[in-house]
């Protein structure tokens, strides 16, 4: 079975013919698509035109959870199965969310810049960091990532609230979205990008956060209205942000968020650990074997 790994890395699996292609090499990708029976997809958007170049394609396997970068309707029209692997990156993303909170609170970006310029000590008296202990953190989402992160936050003394699509009346930490925002010193995004969640955190909702709050996003960039976020950060109403995702990716060099020293940024790599890759490949290989045997796929989306 010919498998096309659409990422700049090599992988070998017994019984599978795995070829790889960088997400930045569209020419090689087009050359490899005609022979691909399975596509291991990461982030580069996959269109109907791509699928038309792959007449043998039977399965698009998302290496991760979010399938917003796949034209699901086009796949269904062509009889191509789509599967993802929820939870396999949860530990890595939860840890990165915690990292971004701490980095924003402790003013890592300006301290790093000053240290590199030889201005590390004495510290600027205006650069005073904060601690997670005693703060209220609101989590947008109640899935596995949010659940793991909740445990980490509570272990360091934070109060954790969360919201989800379905009310959970039995859990005193659950809140309606607007109520959660009003109570949160830090808000962390853990929801998929859908029509309902696009710009979920717009100017109106960002204004509900207490003055000096911090926003963290390791989910999808367009859940937050970037223009509104920039305005709130520039005005000083929000103290900072920790962002692994952006509305346009790769993030453009002119994005104003990159010029703010109260913003910590990463290039959509919250999931990127050796351990995550091991879990990804275990699921991806198993689904290839299930496909070959005509068995039900794990985590089929379409």
Image (tube, rainbow, N blue to C red):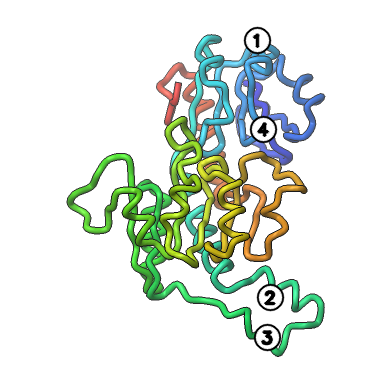
Q: CA distance from mark 3 to mark 2?
A: 8 Å
Measure the alpha-carbon separation of dots 4 and 2.
34 Å
Q: Are marks 4 and 1 in contact (CB under 8 Å)?
A: no
| Residue at numbered disc 2 | 111
Q: Position of residue 244 (x, y in %)?
A: 60, 51
The image's mark for residue 44 is 4
The image shows residue 157 at horizontal and vertical percentages of 37, 74
**Figure quadrant of the N terminus:** top right
CA gap, disc 4 and disc 1: 20 Å
Residue displayed at 18% across by 52% down: 170
Q: Residues within 10 Å of mark 1 (few under 14, many from 20)?
A: some
Residue 55 shows which numbered tag? 1
Q: Which residue is mark 3?
A: 123
Does label 4 or label 1 sit earlier along the sequence? 4
Q: Which mark is residue 112?
A: none
- The answer to which of 150 and 111 lies nearer the viewer is 111
Front residue (pair 14, 226): 226
Residue 187 against residue 39 in the figure, above or below: below
CA neighbours of label 2 inside 10 A, class few (<14), some (14 to 19), many (20+): some
Which of discs 3 and 1 lies nearer the camera? The answer is 3
Relative placement, left or right, of 221 versus 197 is: right
Q: Residue at x 47, y 19 (%)?
A: 293
The earlier-in-sequence mark between 3 and 1 is 1
Give whichever of discs 2 and 1 has the lower sequence position.
Answer: 1
Asked if the residues shown at circle 3 and circle 2 are in contact, with their CB atoms under 8 angstroms apart, the answer is: yes
**Mark before the other along the chain sequence, 3 or 2:** 2
The answer to whether mark 3 and mark 1 are in CB contact below 8 A is no
Q: Quadrant of the C terminus?
A: top left
Classify 10 Å Cα crowding around label 4: few (below 14), some (14-19), many (20 and above). some
């Amino acid at each position: 079975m010919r498998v096309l790994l659409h990422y700049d890395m090599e992988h070998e699996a017994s019984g599978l013919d795995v070829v790889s292609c960088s997400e930045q090499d569209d020419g090689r990708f087009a050359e490899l698509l005609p022979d691909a029976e399975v596509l291991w997809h990461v982030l580069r958007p996959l269109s109907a035109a791509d699928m038309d170049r792959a007449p043998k394609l039977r399965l698009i396997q998302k290496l991760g959870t979010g399938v917003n970068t796949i034209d699901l309707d086009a796949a269904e029209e062509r009889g191509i199965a789509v599967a993802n692997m929820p939870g396999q990156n949860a530990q890595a993303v939860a840890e990165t969310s915690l990292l971004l909170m701490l980095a924003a609170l402790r003013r890592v970006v300006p301290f790093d810049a000053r240290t590199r310029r030889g201005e590390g000590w004495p510290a600027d008296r205006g650069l005073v960091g904060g601690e997670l202990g005693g703060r209220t953190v609101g989590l947008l989402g109640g899935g596995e990532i949010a659940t793991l992160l909740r445990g980490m936050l509570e272990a360091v003394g934070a109060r954790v609230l969360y919201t989800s699509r379905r009310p959970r009346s039995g859990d005193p930490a659950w809140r309606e979205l607007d109520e959660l925002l009003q109570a949160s010193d830090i808000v962390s995004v853990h929801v998929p990008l859908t029509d309902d969640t696009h710009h979920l955190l717009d100017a109106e909702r960002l204004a509900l956060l207490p003055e000096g709050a911090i926003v963290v996003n390791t989910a999808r960039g367009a859940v937050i209205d970037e223009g509104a976020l920039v305005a709130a950060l520039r005005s000083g109403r929000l103290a900072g942000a920790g962002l692994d995702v952006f509305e346009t990716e790769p993030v453009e060099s002119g994005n104003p968020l990159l010029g703010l020293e109260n913003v910590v940024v990463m290039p959509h790599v919250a999931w990127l650990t050796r351990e995550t890759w091991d879990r990804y490949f275990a699921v991806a290989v198993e689904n290839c074997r299930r496909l070959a045997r005509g068995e039900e796929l794990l985590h089929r989306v379409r």
